[in-house]
Amino acid sequence: MSPCVSAPENRVVVFLHSGEYDRVHQGLSIAAAAVASGRRAEVYLFWWALERFLMDRLDEPDFTGRDDISDRFETRRMPTLRALLEHIRETGLATVAGCTGSLGALGGEPKAGDSGIDVWLGWSAILQRTAGVTDRFYL
């Protein structure tokens, strides 16, 4: 097992496919809860979630057609995606991985280096890294 991968029973894995703000927020919140309890968290980005990171759309809540939620979100000072991401990274217990297949499909290669994504992996490596993990979340 590589040094950046801990025992399956100690990890939480979050697979983010949708780029909708609420889903990405939920996924990063799950990772934040995991690292707060001393567990490792691995967040895997695919398709539209990956595109949100590549486009650096992490600051402004965008709940399409739901201004009431956006207003409540800000009034309650809920953390932005960027704030959650910074929190999980500061702990040293989280890894954010991007899918190379999704990166290619999106034509995002020019933005990959500036994305802040820790590691780029294909499905073979993702399956190998997440084998045996029971705490998996798909959003």
Image: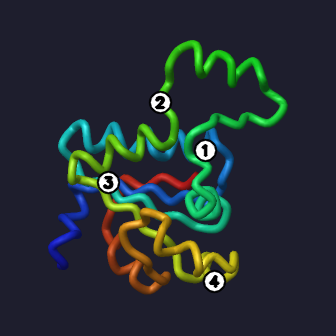
Task: Find out whether the residues at labels 2 and 1 contact each other: C-beta distance under 8 Å.
Answer: no
The number of discs equals: 4
- Residue 63, relative to residue 23: is it above or below? above
Which residue carries the number 4 mark? 104
Which residue carries the number 2 mark? 79
SS class, disc 3: strand
Residue 6: where, in percent of width, then height?
A: 19, 65
Camera-nearest label, 2 or 1: 2
* Of 26 and 66, the residue lying toward us: 66
Which residue carries the number 3 mark? 41
Which residue carries the number 1 mark? 23
| Label 3 neighbour load within 10 Å: few <14, some 14-19, many 20+ | many
- Residue 54, relative to residue 28: is it above or below? below
Residue 3: where, in percent of width, then height?
A: 15, 73
SS class, disc 2: loop
Question: How far is the residue under mark 2 from the one under mark 1?
Answer: 14 Å
Task: Find out whether the residues at labels 1 and 3 contact each other: C-beta distance under 8 Å.
Answer: no
N-term mark: 2 or 4: 2
The amino acid pointed to by label 2 is Pro
N-term mark: 1 or 4: 1
